[in-house]
Image (tube, rainbow, N blue to C red):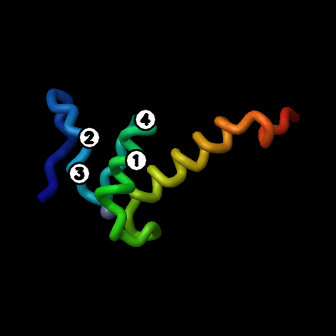
Amino acid sequence: MRTPWSPQRAAPVSDSCAMVPERFTEDLAHSILLIHRSCPTDQCARRKAAVFFLYEQRMTALPRRRRAR
Ligand SMILES: [Zn+2]
């Protein structure tokens, strides 16, 4: 079932694998990983985006690892 993103409902959780939210939060990313945990990462754009987001979050959350160039 393909319904376009309806702007009136901000229902973040139960979306299909192909749908990637425009704005991520850490909570959203975690819930996506939970829901899509059985999805192969290379076949689930939603999971992939969440993994990438959390990865970036972690990188910026660790000041020691950040190298200013
Ligand atoms: Zn999925």
Q: Is residue 46 visible?
A: no
Q: Quadrant of the N terminus?
A: bottom left
Label pair 2/3, CB-CB below 8 angstroms: yes
The percent coordinates of residue 32 (x first, y second) are 35, 51
Q: Earlier in the sequence, mark 3 or mark 4?
A: 3
Q: Tell me the number on the disc at residue 30.
A: 1
* Marks 3 & 1, CB-CB < 8 Å contact: no
Q: CA distance from mark 3 to mark 1?
A: 14 Å
Nearer the viewer's eye, disc 4 or disc 1? 1
Q: Depth-wise, is mark 2 or mark 1 nearer the camera?
A: 1
Query: Which mark, residue 58?
Result: none
Which structural element holds mark 2?
loop
Mark 2–mark 4 Cα distance, whole angstroms, equals 11 Å
Q: Give the number of the mark in front: 3 or 4.
A: 4
Which residue has dot 2 on it?
12
* Disc number for residue 15: 3
Q: Earlier in the sequence, mark 2 or mark 1?
A: 2
| Residue 10 figure quarter | top left
In the displayed structure image, the side of residue 68 where residue 39 appears, left or right: left
Dot 3, crowdedness within 10 Å: few (<14), some or many (≥20)? Answer: some
**Secondary element at tag 3:** loop
Tell me whether circle 3 and circle 4 mark residues in contact (CB < 8 Å): no
User: Which residue shows up at 58% across the image and 40% down it?
Assistant: 57
Whichever of callouts 3 and 1 sits on the residue coming sooner in the sequence is 3
- Real-space Cα separation, disc 2 to disc 1, in angstroms: 12 Å
**Label 4 amino acid?**
Thr
